Image: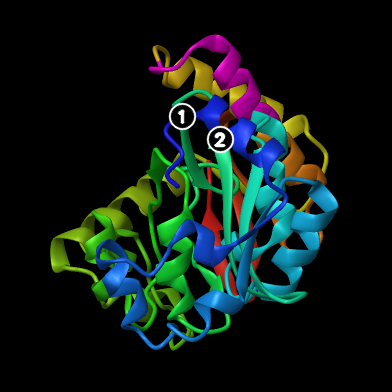
C-alpha cells in the first residue's frame, strides 16, 4: 500500500482510521525480509494509525523523544512546522492501544515530499521506537516520496539499505567536544599552527580597532530583525521564492518566542557604534548551537 502522491495519501487517510498491519504488509514472498527480523509473530497483532492532530502528535512525541539534543524537542521542531505551515503525519504502530513506534513526518508542500517533522533543514533525527526491529515496519508503511535526512546512528541502521538510500551521517556535521578544555588557549592548541596564528592575528587587529562584543539573552525580536536585514543584504539571490523565505523567517521568530527548554541568545559585534555581525545562538544540555 504505497502512497504515490499527496492527494492520494490524504484520501487514504480519510478512508482508513486504524489499519491492521497484516492488511498492509501480508506474509508474501515480496515481504519475506519483514518476517525474518523477529517480528513475524508481532505483525498480526499490530495496527497502523496516522495522526495529524497537534495534541495527538505532541503526546506521542513527548512519550518517545529521547530529548538528548535540541532537535529532539517538540517546541523547537513544532516552530518549524508551524512557521512553514507543514502538516504533521505521525505514522504510529500500535499493539492494541499501546504505541510501539512512531515515524514523525510532515509534508513539505514546497518540495512536494514527506520529511521529518519540522523540515529538512533540521538534523540528528531518530526513529521513535521501543525496539529497533520496529523501524523496518515503519519504513515499509511509510508514504512516498519520502526524504529522511541526517539520520542519527542507532543499532541496525546499516541494515536499512533494503529500503533505499538510508544512511547515518553524524560525521558530516561540524561538532567539537570542548568539555575537557578550561581555557581558550587549550582549545587553540588543538588547531593547526597556521590557524592559531591567523586567529590570534585577527583578534589583535580587531581589538586595536576598538571592536566591542556584546552577548544578550533575550526573546526580544529587535536583534533578530536586525540580523534578518543583514542576511538579506549579504545573501541576496537565495534560490527560493519570497513567500517561502518569509515563512522561513517566521519559523525563526517562533523559535525565539517558544524558547523554554532551551536558552536563546545573540552575540553582537560592533565597530564604531556600527553593527558588524550578529550570531543567533541556542544552548541546550551544555550543547552550543550557532544558528544564524
Q: In the figure, is residue 41 to the left or right of 37? A: right
Residue 91, x across and y down, in percent: 60, 56
Visual colour scheme = rainbow
Question: What secondary structure is marked by label 1?
Answer: loop
Decide: is 90 above or below 193.
above
48 versus 190 height, above or below: above
Figure quadrant of residue 188: bottom left
Q: Residue at x 49, y 57 (%)?
A: 24
Which percent across, then down, holds residue 26? Answer: 42, 64
Secondary structure of the residue carrying tag 2 is helix
Majority secondary structure of magenta residues: helix
Dot 2 and dot 1 residues touching (CB under 8 Å): yes
Residue 254 is a magenta residue: no
Work out whether 175 lies above or below 278: below
Query: Observer-nearest residue: 126 or 51?
Result: 51
Quarter holding residue 58? bottom right
Read off the residue under disc 2.
9
* Residue 273 seen in this snapshot: no
Mark 1 — residue? 5
To which quarter of the image does residue 10 belong? top right
Magenta span: 238-250
At 75% across and 56% down in the image, what residue appears?
Answer: 57
Report, in whole angstroms, how far the alpha carbon at label 2 lies from the one at label 1: 6 Å
Amino acid at each position: 500500500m504505497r502512497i504515490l502522491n499527496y492527494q492520494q495519501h490524504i484520501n487514504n487517510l480519510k478512508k482508513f482510521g486504524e489499519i491492521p498491519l497484516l492488511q498492509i504488509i501480508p506474509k508474501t514472498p515480496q515481504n519475506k525480509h519483514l518476517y525474518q527480523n523477529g517480528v513475524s509473530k508481532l505483525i498480526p497483532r499490530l495496527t497502523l494509525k496516522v495522526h495529524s492532530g497537534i495534541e495527538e502528535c505532541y503526546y506521542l512525541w513527548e512519550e518517545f523523544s529521547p530529548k538528548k539534543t535540541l532537535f529532539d524537542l517538540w517546541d523547537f521542531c513544532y516552530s518549524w512546522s508551524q512557521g512553514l505551515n507543514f502538516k504533521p503525519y505521525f505514522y504510529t504502530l500500535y499493539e492494541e492501544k499501546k504505541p510501539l513506534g512512531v515515524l514523525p513526518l510532515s509534508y513539505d508542500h514546497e518540495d512536494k515530499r514527506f520529511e521529518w517533522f519540522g523540515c529538512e533543514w533540521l538534523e540528528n533525527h531518530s526513529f521513535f521506537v521501543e525496539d529497533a526491529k520496529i523501524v523496518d515496519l515503519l519504513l515499509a508503511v511509510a508514504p512516498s516520496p519520502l526524504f529522511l535526512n541526517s539520520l542519527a546512528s542507532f543499532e541496525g541502521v546499516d541494515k536499512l539499505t533494503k529500503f533505499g538510500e538510508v544512511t547515518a551521517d553524524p560525521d558530516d556535521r561540524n561538532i567539537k567536544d570542548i568539555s575537557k578544555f578550561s581555557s581558550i588557549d587549550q582549545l587553540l592548541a588543538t588547531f593547526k599552527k597556521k590557524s592559531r596564528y591567523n586567529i590570534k592575528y585577527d583578534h589583535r587587529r580587531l581589538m586595536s580597532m576598538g571592536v566591542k562584543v556584546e552577548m544578550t539573552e533575550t526573546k526580544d525580536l529587535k536583534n533578530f530583525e536586525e540580523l534578518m536585514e543583514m542576511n538579506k543584504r549579504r545573501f541576496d539571490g537565495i534560490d527560493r521564492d519570497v513567500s517561502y523565505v518569509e515563512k522561513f523567517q517566521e519559523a525563526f521568530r517562533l523559535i525565539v518566542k517558544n524558547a523554554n527548554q532551551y536558552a536563546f541568545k545573540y552575540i553582537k559585534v560592533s565597530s564604531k557604534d556600527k553593527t558588524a555581525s550578529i550570531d543567533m545562538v541556542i544552548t541546550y544540555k551544555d550543547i552550543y548551537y550557532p544558528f544564524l
